[in-house]
Image (cartoon, rainbow, N blue to C red):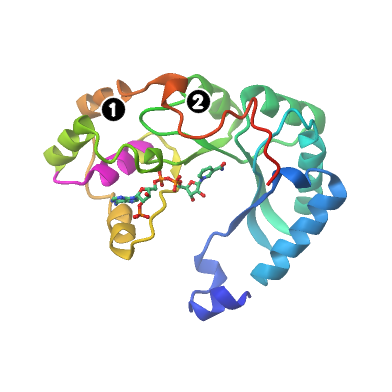
Amino acid sequence: MGDAIRHAGIPHGELFITSKLRNGGHARDLALRSFDETMARLGLEQLDLFLIHWPVPSQDRYVEAWRTLVELKEQGRVRSIGVSNFDVNHLERIIGETGETPVVNQIELHPRFQQRDKRDFHAGRGIRIESWSPLGSGRLLDDPTIAGIGRKHGRSIAQTIIRWHLQQGLIVIPKTTHKERMVENLDVFGFELDADDMQKLQALDRGSAGRVGADPATAAFLF
Ligand SMILES: NC(=O)c1ccc[n+]([C@@H]2O[C@H](COP(=O)([O-])OP(=O)(O)OC[C@H]3O[C@@H](n4cnc5c(N)ncnc54)[C@H](OP(=O)(O)O)[C@@H]3O)[C@@H](O)[C@H]2O)c1
């Protein structure tokens, strides 16, 4: 087990460890080497989840990368494999060409960018959506509508948004550098948003104008 994990005193069995393949490493040999380096740094024998970070369609090597992840899974070096920032056409292609469906697609998703047009496709194939920048990278934390809903339940804006993700069956990965906020963000199981709250939150969707990150169809950075 890795030093960092061992020093924190937390057994691996109590953690779920995910890593991602960087964009410049889609070629099979690079992907295998990069996975080995990741595992050496983590000091792990088996990873819980490995994702392809972005499809980078202009590079057109994400099917090769996906085949390599399938290989790693078959070797037992990773328990589950998935993708990140894949649009429906990218998902259709990897599933069609390899017969292997990712368990997770980690995509930008928050009340201002709800990606509802993609939900049925994922549900129909059993791919779980994991929302990145679930708080809009912090930009939603002064939203008056969400603040009002939070007040009604005696909860913060962050808790209200995290609850909104969970009630839709979305996996949610809010990030904070503050311990007390981490505790706050985990304390979201003692209340429930009602249909009126959910409707108000749904109305905050701005479509692609609400994005805070890059568009997977055109993103071409290689880190
Ligand atoms: N797959 C991808 O391509 C991709 C892209 C972007 C991000 N991600 C992942 O998504 C995760 C989160 O994304 P993110 O950091 O961009 O955005 P986020 O989780 O939506 O928002 C983080 C911001 O919210 C603040 N915050 C968090 N909890 C708070 C609370 N309870 N009260 C007040 N402020 C709070 C944080 O500030 P403090 O730290 O100061 O508390 C930080 O500024 C990360 O793990 C990241 O790696 C993935």
Q: Is residue 45 visible?
A: no
Determine whether, in the image, residue 72 is placed left or right of residue 112: right
Question: In the rendered view, would you say 169 is above or below 173?
Answer: above
Q: Is residue 201 visible?
A: yes
Residue range (magenta)? 154-165
Q: Amino acid under label 2?
A: Arg
Rendered image: mark on residue 210:
none
Horizontal side of 176 relative to 53 (left or right) equals left
- Tag count in the figure? 2
Main SS type for the magenta part?
helix
Classify residue 89 by image quadrant.
top right
- At 81% across and 49% down in the image, what residue appears? 71
Amino acid at pointer 1: Leu
Q: Position of residue 9 (x, y in %)?
A: 48, 79
Could you tell me which secondary element the residue under label 2 belongs to? Answer: helix
Q: Which residue is mark 2?
A: 119
> Which residue occupies 71% across, 65% down?
39
In front of the other: 120 or 55? 55
How would you rate the neighbour count of disc 1 (Cα within 10 Å): few for under 14, some for 14-19, many for 20 or more? many
Q: Identify the mark nearer the N-term, 1 or 2.
A: 2
- Binning the other alpha carbons within 10 Å of mark 2 as few (below 14), some (14 to 19) or many (20 upward) gives some
Mark 1, residue position: 201
Residue drawn 62% across and 26% down?
87
Name the residue at the right extreme.
29
